[in-house]
Amino acid sequence: MPNANTVVVLDFETTGLSPGVGDRAIEIGAVKIEDGEVTDRFQELMDPGQYVSGYIESYTGITNAMLAQARPCGEVMRDFAEFITGYNLVAHNASFDKRFLDAELERISTDYSGQFSCSMLTARRICQQAPDHKLGTLVDFMNIPIEGVFHRALYDSEMTAKLWLAMLDDVRERYVLSVIDFGLMQKLAKTPKHAVDSFWRATCHKGD
């Protein structure tokens, strides 16, 4: 039964919104968490072989000149595939990051076995009083110290990891659970917001 506090939290910076129209990854950042503790990190720029727009440069701070010095996407992604081997995955707005992970690994005929859980969908159930569910808003809502700049892959993954662990702590304290299964967090993300309490109480009852 995979524990929700042993995961890899990842974040991509990209040339655009969709690999389906040719957009590529330009940076990957990830934090490896084991039993609730950060044990490793992965961060690297990658050359997508295409021009990055001025908007993306200003949004991320990643310039075409920086990418010209980076390794090609395929080389970086081979290393990243090794980094995530054997781990389930978490991302904020996971559908976005999963699309790019799938697309970049497909280009090098590589796959992964871990499943995804979305910290944004989870936060909509756990942090229902937050003004919105953007990463920066949630970090502030959960009183997590901000020590860097958003929209760089490693920093965003670091903040997502802290948010994920804070939400797990909230659930453990609220429902007196010692272990939270990763699959339960996936189910929670699909549970109607009004039914979250009954979802966890049913889970606690099953554990009795």
Image (cartoon, rainbow, N blue to C red):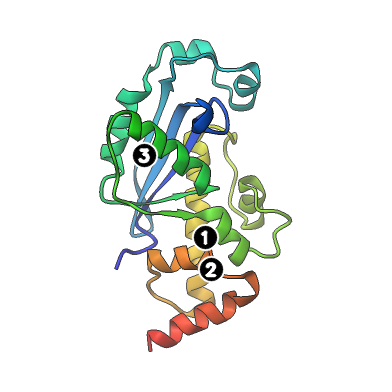
Indicate the secondary structure of the residue bearing disc 2: helix
Mark 2 is surrounded, within 10 Å at the Cα level, by few (under 14), some (14 to 19) or many (20 or more) other residues, namely some
The residue singled out by tag 3 in the image is 41
Asked if disc 1 and disc 2 are in contact, CB closer than 8 Å, the reply is yes
What residue type is disc 2 on? Answer: Asp
Q: Position of residue 95 (x, y in %)?
A: 51, 47
Inter-mark Cα distance, 1 to 2: 6 Å
- Mark 3 surroundings: few (<14), some (14-19) or many (≥20) residues within 10 A: some
Q: Nearer the viewer, residue 105 or 157?
A: 105
Instruction: Give coordinates of residue 148: x percent, y percent.
Output: 57, 36
Q: Residue furthest right?
A: 131
Indicate the amino acid at tag 3.
Arg
Decide: few, some or many residues near mark 1? Use Cα within 10 Å; few <14, some 14-19, many ≥20. Answer: some
Q: Looking at the picture, how far across and down is residue 195, in whole percent?
A: 60, 76
The residue indicated by pointer 2 is: 170
**In this rendering, position of residue 102 left or right of residue 54:** left
Residue 29 in the image: state x and y as whole percent: 43, 35
Sequence-wise first label, 3 or 1: 3
Residue nearest the observer in this picture, 86 or 105: 105
The residue depicted at 65 percent of the width and 53 percent of the height is 133
Question: Considering depth in this image, is 46 or 112 the residue closer to the camera?
Answer: 112
The answer to whether marks 3 and 1 mark residues whose Cβ atoms lie closer than 8 Å is: no
Mark 3, secondary structure of its residue: strand
Residue at the spot 45% in from the left edge and 36% down from the top edge: 100
Q: Amino acid at mark 1?
A: Ala
Q: Which residue is mark 1?
A: 166
